[in-house]
Amino acid sequence: MELRSLHYFVRIAELGSITRAAAHLHVAQPALTRHVQRLEEELNVALFTRANRGVRLTEAGQKLLDGAQRILRDIERTADEIRAQDAHPSGKIVLGITPTLCPVLVPDLFARMRRDYPMIELKVMHAGMVRLEEFVIDGRADIALLSELSRSRLVHSARLAEEEMVLVTRPGARPRGPVGADELRRTPLILGDGLRAAMDALLAGHDIELQVETELNDHETIRLMVAQGAGAAVLPLSSASRECAGGLLEAHRITDAGIFRTLALGVRASRNASLAREAVAHTIRAMIQEVEAEGRLALEARRPAHRRLRAAS
């Protein structure tokens, strides 16, 4: 028993005429007649009898009408619920994010998700690039905001933007302008494991060895120490942009070309997308675009792409 046949049957019964139903449905009258005949053959009963200027339901036809209307209403209600789910995604989503981006994006991300997608339960976990990939692959994270494009075939990553890595100092600690290789070698740095590994990978082959005086993995503490004049640090621009705007820190381009890392969204390649995950991804994309438009991802207009150095993490 086809839903289309039931739909046609209900319309004929409501209008009391195959001719009027054909005009209303924009279906040829012989086609409607065949649908009714198939229903009658399947049920082995007569559904209509002829009446003046139309047709009238038999007792069996009335029973079928009651059931068919209920079935069609249920299907329409289910379709409405599905469409509502499209408009209001729901479910739990675990987002993985790097420590440097966590304070930059997460507070506003929660506010936007509560406002725009109140039926999504968001959980955030932060870790370095390698562990974030592991979280995505083994399913602990549904989506991750990565600090580079993933090289794993098990992770699908999509570029969002490029962010400049800068030397951060106390205001007035050095002249404004790019930091050259010699100066970078001589500068005592406060640097965490993840950013140190990223810089080492970036500078490999350039005969620059960083002078890490203090190893520290808490970026908030690093910013406070730099503001107090305890040393300099290499940080992503977004993580120090507010302090720079407030005059607490200064950010300096590293080399004339600058050093940039790639921000990307990563998901497990074999995992089907969900409406809730796509809602989180859409919100993050919009936030990254806003941060970029505010000038918090790069110090100034970019040099040509072929002259830029790209960070590995």
Image (cartoon, rainbow, N blue to C red):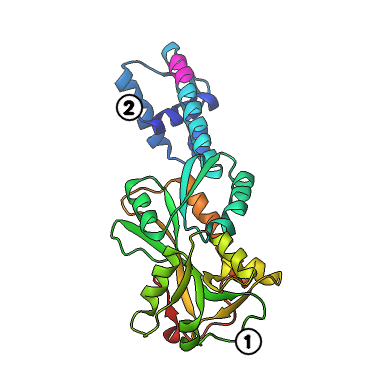
Q: Residues within 10 Å of mark 1 (few under 14, many from 20)?
A: few
Lateral position of residue 194 relative to residue 183, left or right: left
Task: Inspect the magenta stretch and tell me whether residue 38 lies in it.
Answer: no
- Relative to residue 258, is residue 20 depicted above or below? above
Please state which of residues 265 and 58 is positioned toward the viewer in this rendering.
265
Residue 176 occupies which quadrant of the picture?
Answer: bottom right
- Relative to residue 60, is residue 210 depicted above or below? below
Q: Quadrant of the C terminus?
A: bottom left
Determine the residue positioned at 49% across, 23% down. Answer: 69
Which residue is the extreme one toward the left? 153
Q: Position of residue 173 (x, y in %)?
A: 63, 80
Q: Position of residue 256 (x, y in %)?
A: 51, 88
Lateral position of residue 177 relative to residue 127, left or right: right
C-alpha separation, residue under disc 1 versus residue under disc 2: 88 Å
Q: Position of residue 185 (x, y in %)?
A: 45, 83
* Kind of residue at disc 1: Pro
Determine the residue positioned at 49% across, 22% down. Answer: 70
Please state which of residues 237 and 217 is positioned toward the viewer in this rendering.
217
Task: Inspect the magenta stretch and tell me whether residue 65 lies in it.
Answer: yes
* Kind of residue at disc 2: Arg
Residue located beneath label 1 in the image: 175
Please state which of residues 108 and 38 is positioned toward the viewer in this rendering.
108
Residue located beneath label 2 in the image: 38
The stretch of residues the image draws in magenta is 61-67
Q: Position of residue 115 (x, y in %)?
A: 64, 46
Lateral position of residue 127 relative to residue 298, left or right: left
